Amino acid sequence: MEQEDVDRLTHAMHEVKDKVTFCRTCFNLAEGMLCPICSDPGRDPTIVCIVEEVKDLAALERTGEYKGKYHVLGGCISPLDGVGPEDLRIRELLERVRVEGMQEAILATSPTVEGEATSMYVSGLLKPLGIVVTRIASGLPVGGDIDYADEVTLGRALEGRREV
Ligand SMILES: [Zn+2]
């Protein structure tokens, strides 16, 4: 690489680091106070999709299927790693649901033991607020064989079945 390119790249990286922060509402990456999703008036403010990390939000956005808001927890409950509910942005989520008058929360945490535990914990706190709480169905990977799927995936695929 040319020295000039290296300098340009270094400069660009510094600029990104200085500019990018977390959205103060949903904790997505943002270049100002709010991320592009929170500042988009076209997004449905009555639905919130709860994810562990920003990369999960990005993956859901790529599907183009979802038009509501998000809330990034910042991880999942994992006692082995010393991560408890108080380390996640759960308090902020409950506050948002109350203040913003949300009507549905979609739990899109990972289909892992930790993700499931987090989902159950958060739904236990959301339900008393009187909103509809749903969990994304995690099905089988496209192109995979049923007999190669682990039992958690298969169990969830069964649970999330739809009428055809
Ligand atoms: Zn946001």
Image (cartoon, rainbow, N blue to C red):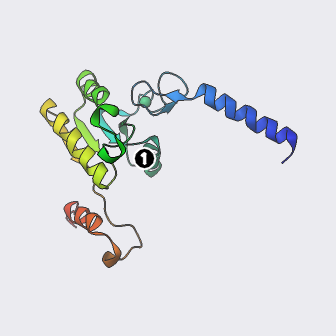
Question: In the picture shown, does residue 15 fall above or below 132?
Answer: above
Q: Which residue is more in the foreground, 138 or 90?
A: 90
Q: How many marks?
A: 1
Q: Quadrant of ligand 1?
A: top left
Q: Is residue 132 left or right of residue 114?
A: left
Q: Residue at x 40, y 68 (%)?
A: 142
Q: Residue at x 57, y 29 (%)?
A: 20
Q: Which residue is mark 1?
A: 56
Q: Residue 58: x and y, percent?
A: 47, 45
Q: Secondary structure at mark 1?
A: helix
Question: In the picture shown, does residue 47 fall above or below 136?
Answer: above
Q: Residue 62: x and y, percent?
A: 47, 49
Q: Quadrant of the C terminus?
A: bottom left
> Looking at mark 1, is its residue's CB closer than 8 Å to ligand 1?
no
Q: Could you tell me if residue 92 is visible in this image?
A: yes
Q: Residue 45: x and y, percent?
A: 32, 30
Question: Residue 68 lies in what quarter of the image?
Answer: top left
Q: Residue at x 32, y 55 (%)?
A: 112
Instruction: Give the crowd class for mark 1: few <14, some 14-19, many >=20 residues within 10 Å.
Output: some
Q: Residue at x 29, y 37 (%)?
A: 84
Q: Could you tell me if residue 108 is visible in this image?
A: no
Q: Residue 99: x and y, percent?
A: 26, 21
Q: Amino acid at mark 1?
A: Asp
Q: Which residue is more in the foreground, 148 or 107?
A: 148
